[in-house]
Amino acid sequence: MRGLTCSLPGWVVICVLAGLSPARAACVDGDTSRGLQKSFEGLLNSFRTVYDLSAVRVDGRLDAASRDYACAMAEAGHFDHTGPDGRQPADRALAAGFRFCSLGENLGMGHPDETAVMNGWIESAGHRSNLLDPGHQVYGFGVMQLMGEAADDGSQRLAELGRGVVSGGELRETGPTGPRYWVLMLGVPGC
C-alpha cells in the first residue's frame, strides 16, 4: 500500500492510493502555451535583433503543429525529433498545411519557463543555428504538460496532478504535472 501526503490550506490529508485505477492523462495548453506566446516571441525576436536579423511572426499552422507535437511527446513520455509515430518535423508541418522552403525544429523538456528554454537553445550550437537562420520568416510555438483525470476507488479520488486531491467528491488545488515539453518550429513558407 502506498500513501501520499497532500498539503491543503490549513490542514493535511493522507490520500491512500492502493486500488486506484491509473489516471488518464490529457495535455494542458490554453493559457500555459498562449499566455507565454508573446513573452517567447519577444525573447526570440530580441535575440535575432542582436544579430541584425528580421523578426519572425507567428504562423497558425506551425503553432498548431508545435502544440500538437508537444502534447504527443508529453502523452508518450517521448523526447525526440522523430515522433512516437515515426513522423519527422517536415511531416508534422505538412500535415498542418504548412508548405515550406526550409524548416527547423527546436525541442526542450523540463525547462521551467520560456527564458530557461530559450537560454538552453542559445547555448546549443544546432538550436542556436535554427534561431539565427536569416531566412526564417515565421514560427510556431507549443508548450505542454500533462494533467491527470481523477481515479475513483469508491471512497477517495486522487487527481494525479502533483498536488491535487479529491476527497468526498470535492476537488482541491489541482494543476498540471510532469515536465514541460517545448517545441519551436521556424520556417520559410512557400516554394
Image (tube, grey):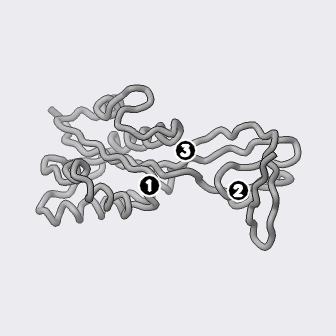
The N terminus lies in quadrant: top right
The C terminus lies in quadrant: top left
Q: CA distance from mark 2 to mark 1?
A: 24 Å
Q: Given the current orientation, which residue lies at the most extreme bottom position?
A: 10
Q: Residue 111 at what x, y percent from top left?
A: 43, 57
Q: Residues within 10 Å of mark 3 (few under 14, many from 20)?
A: many
- Give whichever of discs 2 and 3 has the lower sequence position: 3
- Give whichever of discs 3 and 1 has the lower sequence position: 3
- In the picture of the structure, the residue carrying the numbered disc 2 is 164
Tell me which residue sits at (25%, 45%) in the image: 186
The numbered dot on residue 27 is 3
- In the picture of the structure, the residue carrying the numbered disc 1 is 34
Q: Given the current orientation, which residue lies at the most extreme top position?
A: 86
- Frontmost of labels 3 and 1 is 3
For this view, does 78 lie left or right of residue 100? right
Circle 2: residue type: Gly
Q: Residue 92 at what x, y percent from top left?
A: 35, 32
